[in-house]
Amino acid sequence: MPIFWRIVVSALLLAVLLYQVDWGEANRAIGNIRWGWLIAAITAFNVSMVLAAYRWRLIVLGGRKDGADVGMRKSVTATYASLWLSNFLPTAFGGDVARVFAARSSGAAWSWAISSTVMDRMLGLFALALIFLLSEALLSIIGKPGIWLMPAAVLAGVFAVAFLALAGSAAVRIPRTWLRSRHARSAVRSIRALRILLADRALVFPILMASMAASGFGILAYWGALSGVSPGMPLSTAVAAAALGTIASAVPISLSGWGIREGTVAAVLSQAGGLSVTDAGIAALLNGLVIGATSTIGMFASTRLRWSAAADTRHMFKSR
């Protein structure tokens, strides 16, 4: 979908959310916000970002046979820059271009630089869906109603099947005539990258643990934003809001998920959390504020990334 229409969709969805808010009640809710919870949410989200950067670095290191070696500092810088570019710049390529460029300037082949970013995205969503499923299953086991059990199972199943399909496709013989297409060659290289990564047992477990930890702290950030409006809300509600809101934001119909994420979170909080439409809307907007505030760090990181990447590129040319 063109960028213009994505901006329109985001603006309309946010306008609908704001229209449903009772602003008299909203003033009361804003006046009673527990700012300590909001600070905790921002802290948790930043920890999640660092863990996500570590996960991506491990994936990039899977291509070290090609000379890829991105440091942790650059990984964190590139991850924050990606967040900034994704959330505030209407780029058609998405914020992940920062990480692709950082991986490439660190010695990774183009196919690996792109594949590592795609795999990182998929792992993050899969880990979130898996935690969502475990949370709902636990609620069912202890006798509490897990109303999102079926959607959680479907989401986790979809990502599991996607990974299995990608891994299995690495063993499929590709007709030589197909390889004349640049897109087919790129897809084959990406599948090969996944196969190499899965075969490296020294990296698979740390990557999975980093994925779960990054998603866990991301959920805590949602819980902090929610608790700032409604203390005592169960963590399971935050898990549902985080999983459904994040996955909904990945649907390419709005600008970086703005609007569709907040609307989904508000719907989950009002239906499963029992909050009023106003409190649910304020909590959803606070979560967006947490993401936006953290994104501003990426604004400065993107400047730093540009200079460091340029220096690395000059070094690569000199070495040749």
Image (tube, helix red, strand yellow):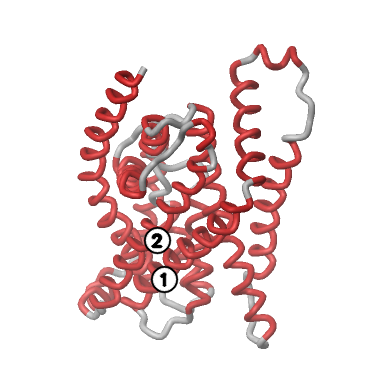
- Give the camera-side residue of 194 and 271: 194
How many labels were placed on the picture? 2
Residue at screen point 60% across, 36% down: 193
Mark number displayed over residue 48: 2
Left or right of 35 on screen, residue 103: right
The amino acid beneath tag 1 is Leu
- Give the camera-side residue of 16 and 232: 232
Quadrant of res 179: top right
User: Percent from the top left, x then y, of residue 207?
Assistant: 54, 55
Q: SS at mark 2?
A: helix
Left or right of 313 on screen, residue 3: right
Asked if the residues shown at circle 2 and circle 1 are in contact, with their CB atoms under 8 angstroms apart, the answer is yes
User: Percent from the top left, x then y, of residue 182?
Assistant: 59, 16
Location of the C terminus (image quadrant):
top left
Query: Which numbered disc, 2 or 1, marks the residue that appears first in the sequence?
Result: 2
Quadrant of res 190: top right
Residue at screen point 54% across, 36% down: 115
The amino acid beneath tag 2 is Ser
Q: SS at mark 1?
A: helix
User: Percent from the top left, x then y, of residue 152?
Assistant: 64, 64
User: Percent from the top left, x then y, of residue 301?
Assistant: 24, 44
Residue at screen point 30% across, 19% down: 318
Q: Badge 2: how crowded within 10 Å, few (<14), some, or many (20+)?
A: many
Mark number displayed over residue 144: none
Q: Is residue 259 placed above or below 252 in the rendered structure? A: below
- Give the camera-side residue of 42 and 256: 42
Any part of residue 178 in sight = yes
The residue tagged 1 is 220
Left or right of 304 on screen, residue 164: right
Residue at screen point 64% across, 79% down: 138
Left or right of 8 on screen, residue 298: left
Q: CA distance from mark 2 to mark 1?
A: 9 Å
